[in-house]
Image (tube, rainbow, N blue to C red):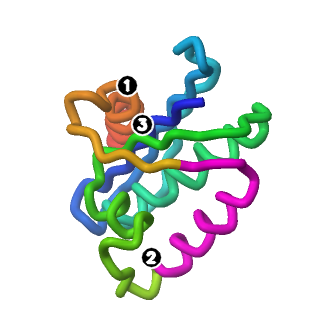
Amino acid sequence: MVLNTDGGARGNPGPGALGVVLRDSSNEKIYEMGKYLGVCTNNEAEYLALIEGMAAAHDKKAKTLVCKLDSELVVKQLKGQYKVKNERLKVLYARVKELEKNFSSVGYEHIPRTKNHEADSLVNKVLDAESR
């Protein structure tokens, strides 16, 4: 399965939200969600989106998972190219690593925001609704 996730916070830290889009092997969308997170940072929102998406993929019985994110920092941390220094991110990083055990393989791919428009749109819809 392919998982696109996005997280964002207006203010950083500020009101945050996540967006998740899950597709099966035939590229059919099988799950999507947007969720308000309260006050958080952009990076926390990115990790929380990934955690939410990985849990959904596990619920949908995914065996393999390709995670596509527009957060270069999170992708490089998960691939071991960057260290996780922030204490709050360390907790979220550990949760992702725990969730990886539910799959036979998990890959992470950094994509440009323009290729992540569905997940990004879910984030913005939630944040726009919360700001009214």
Q: Is residue 25 left or right of residue 12?
A: right
Mark 3 lies on a secondary structure that is helix
The alpha-carbon separation of the residues under discs 3 and 2 comes to 23 Å
The mark closer to the camera, 1 or 3, is 1
The mark closer to the camera, 3 or 2, is 2
**Looking at the figure, which quarter contains the C terminus?**
top left
Q: Earlier in the sequence, mark 3 or mark 2?
A: 2
- Residue 5 x/y as whole percent: 44, 41
Query: Quadrant location of residue 39?
Result: bottom left
As drawn, the label of residue 126 is 3
**Residues packed near mark 2 inside 10 Å, few (<14), some (14 to 19) or many (20 plus):** some
Mark 2 lies on a secondary structure that is helix
Amino acid beneath label 3: Val
- Residue 81 x/y as whole percent: 32, 72
Amino acid beneath label 1: Glu
Q: Earlier in the sequence, mark 1 or mark 2?
A: 2
Residue on which the image places disc 2? 89
**Numbered range of the magenta stretch:** 89-106
Q: Residue at x 72, y 60 (%)?
A: 101
